[in-house]
Image (spheres, helix red, strand yellow):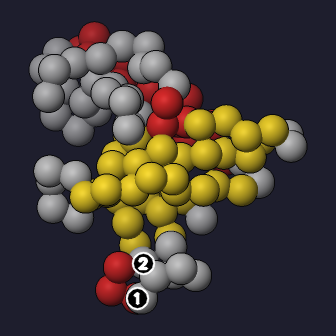
Amino acid sequence: MARVIDGDTVAVDASADLPPELSSLKVRLRSVDTPETLRPKCEAERIVGEAATVFADRAINMASLIVVRDPEWGKWGGHVVADLVLDVNGGRSPLGRLPATASTQM
């Protein structure tokens, strides 16, 4: 099970594979940097950030299987940087490798 936090971060329930204290992971999608929605610098950034969140949410909700691939600890506490591979309509799509439609510097 996964829940989109924003366009480049997804909360993943990994309770089937990890001990309880590590089972709720925030996965930052590798190679994806979308505009902020929580504290945007301007209205345009908020609008594009929300569009990126909707895109990620639709992709996650269409997937029948979600695989976290090549995880590594990120520079922010509690976050893992990884690829998410989504099984959509019988084919696999690496969400973490898709280019962002808009990006901001972090």
Residue, disc 1: 20
Picture quarter containing residue 79?
Answer: bottom left
Quarter containing the N terminus: bottom right
- Measured as percent of width and height from the top left, residue 94 is found at 59, 37
x 42%, y 78%: residue = 23
x 58%, y 82%: residue = 16
x 50%, y 73%: residue = 14
- Measured as percent of width and height from the top left, residue 36 is found at 25, 30
Residue, disc 2: 23
Callouts 1 and 2 close, C-beta under 8 Å: yes
Circle 2: element type: loop
Picture quarter containing residue 34?
Answer: top left
- Which amino acid type corresponds to the residue marked 1 in the rendered image? Pro
- Which amino acid type corresponds to the residue marked 2 in the rendered image? Ser
Q: Is residue 93 above or below residue 67?
A: above
Q: In this view, does 5 lie above or below 7?
A: below
